[in-house]
Amino acid sequence: MLVVMKNDATAEQVEAVIAEIQRLGFRGVPMPGAQRTAICIIGNKGPVEDTGLRALPGVKETIPVTKPYKLVSRETHTEPSVLTIGGIKIGTGEPVIMAGPCAVESEEQALTIAAIVKEHGAQVFRGGAFKPRTSPYAFQGLGEKGLKILDKVRRETGLLIVTEAIDSESLTAVEKYADIVQIGARNMQNYSLLRLAGQMKKPVLLKRGFAATIDEWLMAAEYIMSEGNPGVILCERGIRTFADNTRNTLDLSAIPSIKEVSHLPIIVDPSHAAGRRDYVIPLSRGAIAVGADGLLVEVHHDPAHALSDGMQSLYPEQFTELMREVKRLKNCL
Ligand code: PEP
Ligand code: MN
């Protein structure tokens, strides 16, 4: 349930409503809006008896929330959320481009690719230091050493850093160095990791699980938000289907579906969806056209020798072309 306060409700009246919600055995999370504050009740398993709440000073009305997710829902936050992260805004309609290699391989590799993507307009550098690989024999990432390289990339280029945490241990390390902490497809339903990510101060890029429905994905985001972290960005990266022409099937319908029911920003990763670089530009065009708030793209200066996902990494010239097309498309939209 949502308790909507009057326009002129005081901070004390908001506090009193939260205290009453607590007395009822639930939690009240204030959601300040442009016009007025609403307080979302969480922790209830069924409908809440609202007569006492409606009678409190400053309360305008109470609205039942019909979805199983609450904090991520448009029912509790009608306007799209805009996240401000180190000077960039995500969710404004202007696409934010996050680009870089699949994995950080060396300082030289990371700095070379960072210079390329920065020159052509990326705002965020991506690169995994902890890699969740299908094979235990594949390159697993440089770990903390990789995070230190990413820190250097930030200092030298001014790009923000997004990098993945794969478990609670790496989360502690990643939180120290990253501007945005990525939770990957394989961990989308790792509820203990989601809770820990919810307790951090850093925003989270939550990728869609291979076989997750929209509701399951939003419930995963709800785990993060219910722990107090409002900074969640969703990332559609393709799902498992019977189709084998691509590595995964990019579900572009997820973007309007998410925007209909949630206020969270959503970006698209065409690289892990396609699995091949020649499809990345066309899929990116589609993503921008359906209203994605940004792209997460793999780029490598020498993909033939990349230690992971070389096949789907754009050549620098292709990244330049992608940026040109995104700009053109945005103008024509
Ligand atoms: C990645 O971004 O490098 C990655 C491993 O992505 P996903 O979790 O979508 O497979
Ligand atoms: Mn990858």
Image (spheres, grey):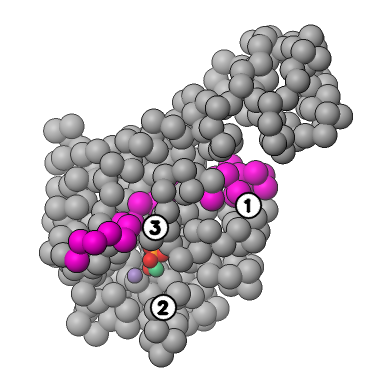
Secondary structure, mark 2, is loop
- Quarter of the rendered image showing ligand 1: bottom left
Q: Is 39 part of what is drawn in magenta?
A: no
Measured from the top left, where is residue 144 in percent x and y?
55, 78
Say whether disc 1 or disc 2 marks the residue closer to the N-terminus: 2
Pointer 2 residue = 133
In the structure shown, which secondary structural element does the residue marked by tag 1 occupy? helix
Residue stretch in magenta: 220-244
Tag in front: 1 or 2: 2
Residue at numbered disc 3: 211
Residue 144 visible: yes
- Real-space Cα separation, disc 1 to disc 3, in angstroms: 23 Å
CA gap, disc 1 and disc 2 = 24 Å
Label 3: element kind: loop
Question: Does residue 254 appear left or right of residue 174 in this picture?
Answer: left
Kindly identify which numbered label has been placed on residue 314.
none
Q: Residues within 10 Å of mark 2 (few under 14, many from 20)?
A: few
